[in-house]
Image (spheres, grey):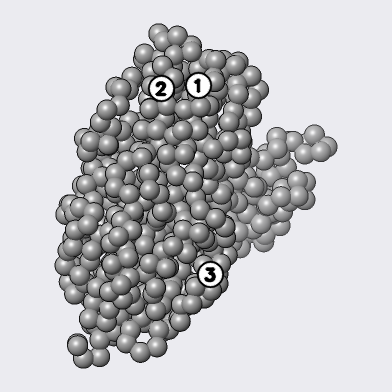
Amino acid sequence: MTDNAELVFCPLGGVGEIGMNMGLYGFGPANERTWLMVDCGVSFAGPDLPGVDLIMPDIRFIEAERKNLAGIIITHAHEDHYGALMDLWPRLEVPVYCTPFTAGLLKAKVYGHGGVDVPVTVVEQGERIQVGPFDVELIAMSHSIPEPTALAIRTEFGTVLHSGDWKIDPEPGVGRPIDVKRLREIGDEGVLALISDSTNATREGVSPSEADVARSLTEIISKAKHRVAVTTFASNVARLRGVALAAEACDRDVVVIGRAMKRTLDVAAELGYMDGIKPFLDEEAYGYLPRDKVLALCTGSQGEARAALARIASDDHRSITLNSGDMVIFSSRTIPGNEREVNRIINALVSDGINVMTDRDGLVHVSGHPRLGEMEQLYDMIRPMIALPVHGEAMHLEAHARFARRQGVKTVITAYNGTMVRLAPGKAEAIDEVPVGQILKDGGMLVEPEFSGVVERRRLSFGGVVVGSIVLNSSGEIVADTDVVVIGVPEVDEDGDDFEEIVIDAIEGAIESIPRKRRRDPELVREAARRAARSAVVQRWGKKPVCKILVSVV
């Protein structure tokens, strides 16, 4: 046994939130641990971060420890588990391990959008690899994407099972089903800690199977009289295959619409996951097919403005139209935060007489995460000494913790991003805090939130902007007309007075009130003019715009 060694777990993202998953396992003495990173995910920015594309974990802690980072293992190819890899890997430059499907999607993403071509070592489900002091076995799980894996991480102190995203599905649609036999064997060997998905820990029962959804979709599509469009997560290959089989059973051709969908299907076909499926058609074929013989498989299930379904709903797609009596099936769930965008599209479709079906209307979607019934089965197989819930917000983590205690787990630890937990030796407990936070992908830049300009963008969205230009001579006299531009501010106030003129009067009045000698200080003039301009708008409008004043001395 290594002297003074400890086994620790420290999440940098995904614990206390949905998305942005990144966990660290450390082994060794406190001052010289070797680290293993599990997953490298993103979250998607909402309206509170205008202009931001993606949110990633702040990796300053492990970046400082880069020489001790043995590698990165990706459990599966969902964006919240691997989406930050291209952007953050150049800061780490360590070996990356993933399954063939994940490697294929990563390569396709680079080809389609550009970015860093991250070198990866491809490993199969069921394979065992050595990463530094960590003996890692990739165990086949079931989830809403091919080749999801749990990790049995073995060290001198015992085995930790990191579940990744999972559910128990004996008929996953594509790929291997969850390896229940191997999970039981690992449980029989003895498991120190289970670090597991909490997403559906508030839900009773057992999730339906992908096979159930495929059968339901076939029945629904068979009753449709006209065109059918199905939108779902592009990464859910089992669902795409199920839709294709349903279409074939109903004598319909499938037209694929959307680059992300095409990219996923190309990778899936290369790996054999589309074997036996009738060839898909490009969108150019759509207009030539009889109305009752076509099924459009399209991106946009989350209301994304640039995705295919949004453009179809707004009658802005170059090739695809839907008419009254056609059907759109949302074979997906709406991710929290996307409700407004999704409802906007649904309302547009319904207004055109199109029949819309969601998971509230029938079995057209099933979660890829375990409910309590499945969690109970996993706990019965694994029988861990320690349980540490991850992958969820506070309510999910607490529900998982209560459940684990009911299962008789001796030690249950609720941790959050930045909490370093010692798993062994001795008492399992939180022992330290490391810096955590967010990195924003803003256009082509990675920036910390405080330096991103996002706070000012939010202010701009509420109060607009006022820009003024003043020209003074060396004596402090105004020698040219004051110029003002207002953006996002009403043209006139309630009395009909022009806001630009209101601001000009306020600026010039403020300058005239400054003693002549003091007007020679451009900074003093600039600040006085800024305050006056802002105050004038606040008095007449009641909102505070961003005010910028430019002072030139000639």
**Amino acid found under the numbered disc labelled 3:** Phe
Structural crowding at the residue carrying mark 2, measured as other residues with C-alpha within 10 Å and reported as few (<14), some (14–19) or many (≥20): few
Residue at label 3? 403
Work out how far the residue at label 2 is from the one at label 1, CA to CA, in angstroms.
8 Å
**Amino acid found under the numbered disc labelled 2:** Ala
3 and 2 marks in contact (CB < 8 Å): no
The outermost residue toward the right is 495
Residue at label 1? 222
User: For numbered disc 1, what is the local secondary structure?
Assistant: helix
**Amino acid found under the numbered disc labelled 1:** Ser
Structural crowding at the residue carrying mark 1, measured as other residues with C-alpha within 10 Å and reported as few (<14), some (14–19) or many (≥20): some
Which x, y percent locates residue 387?
43, 74
Q: Nearer the viewer, residue 469 or 210?
A: 210
User: For numbered disc 3, what is the local secondary structure?
Assistant: helix
Q: Which residue occupies 23% across, 63% down? A: 137
Please tell me the numbered disc located at residue 380.
none
Which x, y percent locates residue 315?
53, 19
Q: Is residue 204 visible?
A: yes
Work out how far the residue at label 1 is from the one at label 3, CA to CA, in angstroms.
42 Å
Measured along the vertical axis of the image, is residue 364 above or below residue 283? below
Structural crowding at the residue carrying mark 3, measured as other residues with C-alpha within 10 Å and reported as few (<14), some (14–19) or many (≥20): some
Measured along the vertical axis of the image, is residue 312 above or below residue 32? above
2 and 1 marks in contact (CB < 8 Å): yes
Residue at label 2? 249
Q: Earlier in the sequence, mark 2 or mark 1?
A: 1
Q: Nearer the viewer, residue 525 or 369?
A: 369
